Amino acid sequence: MNNAALLALSRDDLIALILAQHVQIEAQTQQISALTARIAELEAKLAAPPKTPDNSSLPPSKGQKATLPDPTKKPPRPSRPGVARALAEQPDKTIEATLAACPHCDHALGPADQPEIHAYDHIDLPPIRPFVTRINRHSGVCPCCRKHVAAAAPEGLEPGSPFGPGLCALILHLHITQAISFERLARLMSEVFGLTISEGAIANILARAQTPLLAAAAPMAAPMAAAVRASPVVGSDETSARVCGKTWWQWVLLRRRPKTSESREVTRPGISAREIPARAGAR
């Protein structure tokens, strides 16, 4: 509104105009105050450190990982002498690679012309396959006494399980030490060694090994149990195990030196160090 328009207004119109402007100014003043307070609040939040999983209740998944430096801009590592695999002391095969003629001028070359040698080893596994021994036990009727006779089985190759001690030892190692299950062990035998063996046969091999293993561990069981009993502090833990369709409990008792473990069928949850039987070394 210009000066001419204001001069044309009456006294009452000017008063009404001033009152309307006053109301508008008051509303704008309140709005400005609210916006100023909001700006101050937002500026305070900007000054505060950002919330991270380290300084707030944010889960780790909400944290922002730091930007890693460019791997191509790493400073060069200090040089050091190289290390190569040592050559085998007794290689199974040695190949002498020599030149019959110079590749540049085709001049004939002899051993005396090639005194320098670059030696390196090439290592590989031979084809792995089961070694099968067939035993033919001959039998017949004695022409003198007319009784039936049969040749004795060779020592170590008696009838029964077809699997020899080397294969049984490997299965024990892979199942007990490397914790390979029956299914995967049967598959490994087929894929790596070309040997077809069932999970039941593996279970029978493990069952047959129990008696000689317990006999070998028996001399160590009593000293191990006595050492655990004599220890002032014994750490223990237990876990359940299924043995022949029954629930057994396996305890591991640990002191400063080698640990002792045993499995036993029980109906209660705990055992004390004084209750360890003499066979505590057997697993």
Image (tube, helix red, strand yellow):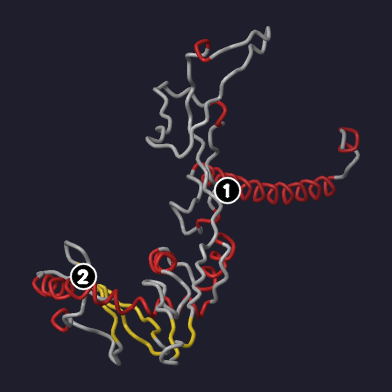
* Quarter residue 281 falls in: bottom left
| Quadrant of the snapshot with the C terminus | bottom left
What is the x, y in percent for residue 177? 38, 64
Q: Is residue 268 above or below residue 92?
A: below
* Quarter residue 236 falls in: bottom left
The residue identified by callout 1 is: 37
| Residue for point 28% across, 74% down | 237
What is the x, y in percent for residue 32? 65, 46
The circle on residue 235 is 2
Q: Nearer the viewer, residue 229 or 147?
A: 147
Q: Amino acid at mark 2?
A: Gly
| Residue for point 54% across, 64% down | 188
Q: Is residue 103 above or below residue 38?
A: above
| Quadrant of the snapshot with the N terminus | top right
Horizontal arrangement in the rendering, residue 231 relative to residue 251 (left or right): left
Horizontal arrangement in the rendering, residue 64 relative to residue 14 (left or right): left
Q: CA distance from mark 1 to mark 2?
A: 63 Å
Q: Nearer the viewer, residue 49 or 11?
A: 49
| Residue for point 16% across, 80% down | 278
Q: Nearer the viewer, mark 1 or mark 2?
A: 2
| Residue for point 25% across, 84% down | 270
Q: Amino acid at mark 1?
A: Ala
* Quarter residue 81 falls in: top left
Asked if the residue under mark 2 is in contact with the one under mark 1, i.e. CB atoms within 8 Å, the reply is no
- For label 1, the crowd category at 10 Å Cα-Cα, with few meaning under 14, some 14 to 19 and many 20 or more, is few
What is the x, y in percent for residue 31? 67, 50
